[in-house]
Amino acid sequence: MPIEKIEKEADLCALFIQEFNELPGWTCYPEAAGFDVLVVHEDGRQIGVEAKLQLNAKVADQILPCRGDDLYGRPGPDYRLVIVSKITDASKGIVKMLEHLGVRVLVPRSSWTSRGDCFTFSLAHSLLEVSGHKPFYDWYMFDWNPPERCQVPVLVTNLPAGVPSPVRLTPWKESALKVIAQLRSQGFITSKQIAEHGIGVSAWTQAPGTKPAWLAKGVVRGTWVETEHLPAFDKQHPEVYALAVDTLKATQPQLELTP
């Protein structure tokens, strides 16, 4: 569906995702790895993308790695990219700064089609990494060569990208959804089972301050059961939760305890 107006950052992301997903070998993951969009090629290459309606200095804080990330071996994408609705006289200097720091800046243009005017990034022509063309007047994106690439979500979700206070699918949430799937399959869960999913136990069993704990003690010692205070992670990410349930059914026999 052509996008005729860009009024918010979510419109920028929707246009970008729509175009990139049409390119062979590339897949877009909205709100992943701390970016508005994480683009992943089938050969493993990654592009971290931040969207801004109006370009400002804050985007540098969002798109650039933290100081010392490379020294501590923290994950990151191969390339970093900012998409913005327009570049003004006031923001030209920010574009120059970002590109000197190794961050590409892309702006969509209005193009006439058989269905009328609509916006496009013309990705097949504007990014050499996508087009495969030899550089003539353009240049390749800077390769950050991270010691480890970002963890890719288990599947593509329908989360909206570029929205205020986004719901993000993080590696922790993926593990939490596996915990919930196992908890509901068995009717209980143990601290050891929670830890086996690679996340801390205290968030589930210990009350933070005045708030109630997510789980309550079960009838059998050492077990925990679900309460109404458990966050609805499964409602936030229903596709990923369904995958966790299916995977559990296929790979893990149900554990039985006797009181």
Image (spheres, rainbow, N blue to C red):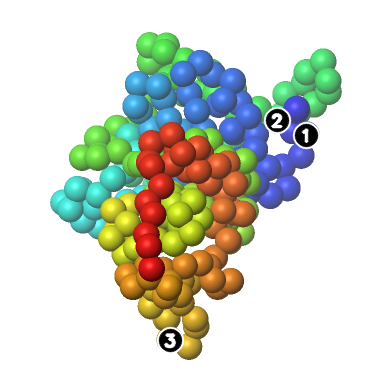
Q: Quadrant of residue 48?
A: top left
Mark 2 to mark 1: distance in Å? 6 Å
Q: Residue furthest bottom?
A: 210
What kind of element bears circle 3? loop
Q: Which mark, by number, is residue 119? A: 2
- Residue wearing tag 3: 209
| Front label number (1 vs 3) | 3
Determine contact: label 2, label 3, CB under 8 Å: no
User: What residue lies at 54% left-to-right and 57% top-to-bottom?
Assistant: 233
Name the mark nearer the viewer: 2 or 3.
3
Amino acid marked by disc 2: Phe
Give left or right: position of 76 versus 152.
left
Query: Which quarter of the rendering shows the N terminus?
Result: top right
Q: CA distance from mark 2 to mark 3?
A: 49 Å
Extreme residue toward the front, this view: 258
Looking at the image, residue 184 sits to the left or right of residue 220; the answer is: right
Q: Which mark is residue 4?
A: 1
